[in-house]
Amino acid sequence: MTDVWKSQVLFTEINGNFAYTAHKSLPQHMKKLVSRIRQVHSFSPPRLPLQSPCTTLHKNASTHHGDGNS
């Protein structure tokens, strides 16, 4: 297995087009590396709620302070 082929496999894996049969035939250490890459790339941070804490704080602030005449 050449280094070029290895890097091509990893590149393909990152793009999410990795064939399962090719994955099964890989050496064990490559499988570990590939699954680690897959974990890193499939991780997505939790989405922020539509109303973020910031807007809530600003709304509260404006309510508490009124329009400045109080």
Image: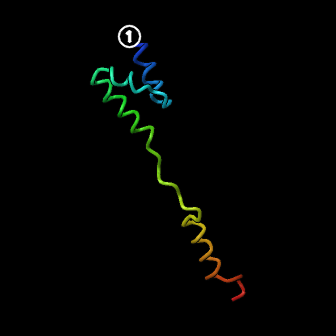
User: Quadrant of the image for the N terminus?
Assistant: top left
Residue 51: image location, x then y, percent:
59, 65
Pick out the residue farthest to the top: 2
Q: Would you place residue 50 above or below residue 61 in this image?
A: above
Front residue of 39/66: it is 39
Question: How dense is the environment of label 1, judged by Cα within 10 Å: few (below 14), some, or many (20 and up)?
Answer: few
Q: Would you place residue 11 above or below residue 55 in this image?
A: above
Pick out the residue farthest to the left: 28
Front residue of 25/51: it is 25
User: Quadrant of the image for the C terminus?
Assistant: bottom right
Pick out the residue farthest to the bottom: 70
The local secondary structure at tag 1 comes to loop
Front residue of 18/68: it is 18
Front residue of 34/60: it is 34
Q: Mark 1 points at which residue?
A: 2
Q: Residue drawn 44% across and 40% down?
A: 42
Q: Residue drawn 56% across and 64% down?
A: 52
Locate residue 26: give its quadrant: top left
Q: Would you place residue 15 above or below residue 51 in this image?
A: above
Please give left or right for residue 33 compared with residue 52 in the image: left
Q: Would you place residue 48 above or below residue 61 in this image?
A: above
The colour scheme of the drawn protein is: rainbow
Question: Which amino acid type is marked by label 1?
Answer: Thr
Residue 68: image location, x then y, percent:
70, 83
Residue 69: image location, x then y, percent:
72, 87
